[in-house]
Image (cartoon, coloured by chain):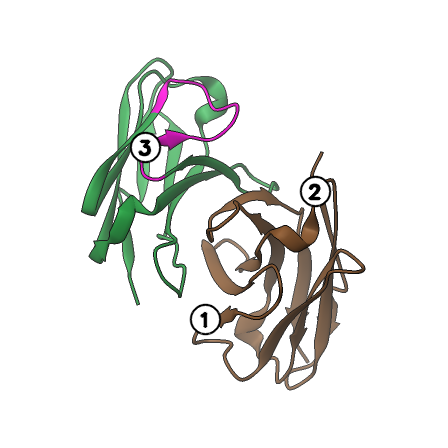
Chain colours: A green, B brown
Amino acid sequence: EIVLTQSPGTLSSSPGERVTLSCRASQGVDYNYVAWYVQKPGQAPRLLMYGASIRATGIPDRFSGSGSGTDFTLTISSLEPEDFAVYYCQQYDRPPFTFGGGTKVEIK
Amino acid sequence: EVQLLESGGGLVQPGGSLRLSCAASGFSFSTFSMNWVRQAPGKGLQWVSSISGTGAATYYADSVTGRFTISRDNSKNTLYIQMNSLRADDSAVYFCAKSIIGSYLFDSWGQGALVTVSS
């Protein structure tokens, strides 16, 4: 099983700031089959990125993803008020299709 | 527009059974793999199970293997999960999620069904 470890657990930032979220895999993820989701309280998750760096439909370009192998990152170039939420990474290379524990981005 | 509507959640005693359904619309259901993901109160996301478009391939998390069974009825555009021998740690919101074609990443989600296992 590929275990995904996200860091930090909580990130306190202000609107307009640049933030970087980390997702580290316990073993290599082939084809960069890593996705990122965002979840707001009381809502279902929403797909942000897949293939480590491909934005899903309708996702603004302030979101970018990178990485390969075991280390992946999600960067938000300039936080908007609606970006304060919880972010999850997921690997879909092989079952079990595991999620990371999440990073909460909160307002400082 | 893709729509996924879960039903069947509720309160069940430990050791009991429950079947969740997910009615899908707005896409060619049989073309896409489908999935269940759960979230315990205040916790993160946990992948539970996936099924291929034809239903020929199924996958389960270790924590539910042997107790849960995923299935689908492509004639009814409906996904199911039969949950037996339920435990307190199965209590969660269960989301139905559609895969992007040819993969097991999730591009559309339902609003979830709450399952509470308690005596």
Please check the rendered image and state whether residue B85 is part of the magenta-colored stretch, yes or no.
no
**Do the residues under discs 2 and 3 have CB atoms within 8 angstroms?**
no
Would you identify the image quadrant in which residue A3 lies? bottom left
The residue drawn where x is 61% and y is 42% is A42
Q: CA distance from mark 2 to mark 3?
A: 26 Å
SS label for mark 3: loop
Name the amino acid type tagged 2.
Phe
Name the front one of labels 1 and 3. Answer: 3
Residue annotated with mark 1:
B61
At label 3, counting other C-alpha atoms closer than 10 Å, the crowd grade (few under 14, some 14-19, many 20 or more) is many
Residues flagged by tags 2 and 3 on a common chain:
no
Residue A105: where, in percent of width, then height?
A: 38, 33
Residues flagged by tags 1 and 3 on a common chain:
no
Name the amino acid type tagged 1.
Ala
The residue drawn where x is 28% and y is 47% is A31
SS label for mark 1: loop
Residue annotated with mark 2:
B27
Main secondary structure of the magenta stretch: loop
Q: CA distance from mark 1 to mark 3?
A: 26 Å
Would you identify the image quadrant in which residue A22 lies? top left
SS label for mark 2: loop
At label 2, counting other C-alpha atoms closer than 10 Å, the crowd grade (few under 14, some 14-19, many 20 or more) is few
Instruction: Reply above or below: A11 against B37.
Output: above
Name the front one of labels 2 and 1. Answer: 2
- Quadrant in which the N terminus of chain A appears: bottom left
**Do the residues under discs 1 and 3 have CB atoms within 8 angstroms?**
no
Residue A41: where, in percent of width, then height?
A: 56, 39
Q: Which segment did they paint magenta? A: A51-63
